[in-house]
Image (cartoon, grey):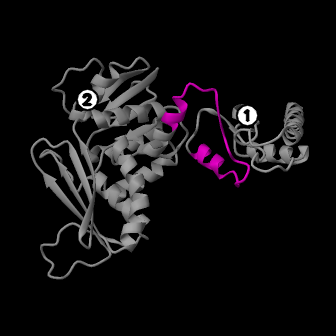
Amino acid sequence: MVRVIMHGCNGRMGQVITEMIAKEAEMEIVAGVDLSDHIQNSYPVFKSMKDCNVEADVVIDFANAKAVDGLLDTCVAKSLPCVLCTTGLSEEQLAHVKEASGKVAILRSANMSMGINLLMKLLKDAVPVLAAAGYDMEIVEKHHNQKLDAPSGTAIALADVMNQAAGGDYEYVYDRSTRREKRPEKEIGISAVRGGTIVGDHDVIFAGQDEVITFSHMAYSRKLFATGAVSAAKFLAGKPAGMYDMSRVNANGYFDAMDADVISFEASRGDLVVLDAIHDAHFETEAGPGVYDIHSPRIPSEKEIEDRIYEILDKMDVKKVWINPDCGLKTRGNAETWPSLENLVAAAKAVRAKLDK
């Protein structure tokens, strides 16, 4: 059972998450934090994180930027992982977040939806091509009239992804009313619209000669963000100190949700960088990185495979390692396959014997 403290429990997102977790069999909100007391919840509500004396496994934060510093201090003091969803943080607060992540697990994302995080991945591929071709880049974001910060944290995050993909030398422009000049090439315009009950719309516009390409994401319900926050809380509970983001939640969620004991993948022809990615993502499923290349007819020696196994053990928990060749064996004949597998088994036994000593 994952025990959750809902920071900002009486806000709109806090109530959506409260309803969602109430239907979860393996999660429970054990306490809430909110200055407002106009809503009766099934759990105790405290005025601040400092006042909260309830044991928990993780905090989900959808509150106000003013409360973030106190939240971070308490999470560090109690070694309490935090899913930080509040936007509009100052540079000083962002520095505080980074400092706190050295002592406790923090997952910070400008937007908890899978769609926005997929959009960021798509932009990493699109921007280098379109920016080099001279396309102007603009972001237009729209939100409800109760949102306090502008532009949205998601718009800034999208701009950061685009800027990095384009080389990192673009300027963000929020207002052109005082300028009387042509649009410079190296800028990303960011415009904010506030009105009605718009949950959250983001358009990324690439304007070129005689054509416009637009990437759009529209959120129709706050449940979209609540789902992401709940998944993030499940992922973050029990994780070691560090800074996490939704890309790790999505990757781990896909693989760890599979009905599989172990996932095998090709690794013999690289420098095992895939294992670094697995380590950084705190991959939970057991894995079998290939120890020899099945695409080649060459028969690997027992010593060669044994050395490769030790390289893998330097990067993975021995309890999660399976020993197998790369991919399948259908491209190889018996003359190559049998001696290769015999050497693999002998190498695995030799390593196991040394580890057991």
- The three-letter amino acid code for the residue at tag 1 is Trp
Disc 1 secondary structure class? loop
Residue 15 or residue 176, whichever sits in front = 176
Residue 285 or residue 174, whichever sits in front = 285
Residue 11 shown left or right of residue 105 in the figure: left
| Spot occupied by residue 189 in the image (x, y as percentages of width and height) | 24, 67
From this view, report whether residue 133 is shown above or below residue 277: below
- Please name the residue shown 45% across and 53% down the image: 98
| Spot occupied by residue 52 in the image (x, y as percentages of width and height) | 35, 29
Read off the residue under disc 1: 322
Residue 305 shown left or right of residue 131 in the figure: right
Of label 1 and label 2, which has the lower sequence position? Answer: 2
Read off the residue under disc 2: 16
- Please name the residue shown 43% across and 26% down the image: 56
Residue 293 or residue 89, whichever sits in front = 293
Residue 300 or residue 81, whichever sits in front = 300
| Spot occupied by residue 91 in the image (x, y as percentages of width and height) | 34, 59
Whether residues under marks 1 and 2 lie with C-beta atoms below 8 angstroms apart, the answer is no
Q: Picture quarter containing residue 22?
A: top left
